[in-house]
Amino acid sequence: MALAKQLLALILISAYIIFATSTNAAKPSNKPSTSTKGAVPGQKANVANMVAKQMQAVEKKIIEFNASLKKRPKTPKSSSHRSRECVSECDEVFGAAIDDIKKTLDSLKSLNLVKANFDVSAVATNVDTCNDCFNDIGKGGDAEVKKFGEWVRKITGDALAALQKAA
């Protein structure tokens, strides 16, 4: 079920990006252009550098959080079968998030901000999938996983806003 949610989220994000890109490209601008060709790449490079730093911080935190999460099944409090399944699922989706961060960094290096936007969205979706697993268990989910997910959504949300503005 979590995989279906993740796939649906990726489809919706992709559709939004395609729609937004095609809508903006089709709109004629009545404003006179005040930028030079050199200004846009400079702005894109600044945004790419900022987002790259954010994604590197997210990568580090995902690795640290995943390591602490993997230690949980060793404690009696979190040793339920379903909880162990969620830890395993989180390990898988956090690995995918790390891969998406690497793709984001490659996209940023080549200043492909549209692709970077998609990759950053995938990072957030993967982390949300982990949280969804714990929420499906019940009892309001897992407080630490929820707090971590909120932090990742904040950072990726800021990165997406910057990428969309610069693209």
Image (tube, grey):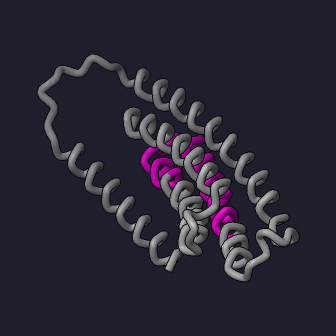
Quarter of the image containing the C terminus? Answer: top left
Q: Does the magenta stretch include residue 66?
A: no
Where is residue 117 shown, x and y percent of the image?
Answer: 46, 48
Name the chief secondary structure element in magenta.
helix
**Residue at the image position 72 percent from the left and 70 percent from the top:** 87
Depth order, front residue of 144/63: 144
- Whole-percent x, y for residue 43 in the image: 46, 25
* 3 displayed left or right of 31: right
The residue that appears at 38% across and 59% down in the rendered structure is: 13
14 lies left or right of 97? left
Residue at the (39%, 39%) spot, across then down:
164
- The extreme right residue here reads 74
Residue at the top extreme?
Answer: 34
Q: Which residue is drawn at 65% across and 60% down?
A: 99
Q: Could you say which quadrant of the image residue 146 lies in?
A: bottom right
From the top left corner, tell me how far across and down residue 123 is, in percent.
56, 56
Total count of labels: 0
Q: Please give the range of residues in magenta.
A: 92-120
Q: In which quarter of the image is residue 93?
A: bottom right
Q: Along the line of sight, which residue is nearer the eye, 5 or 108?
A: 5
**In this picture, residue 73 sits left or right of residue 27:** right
Residue 111 within the magenta-colored segment of the rendering: yes
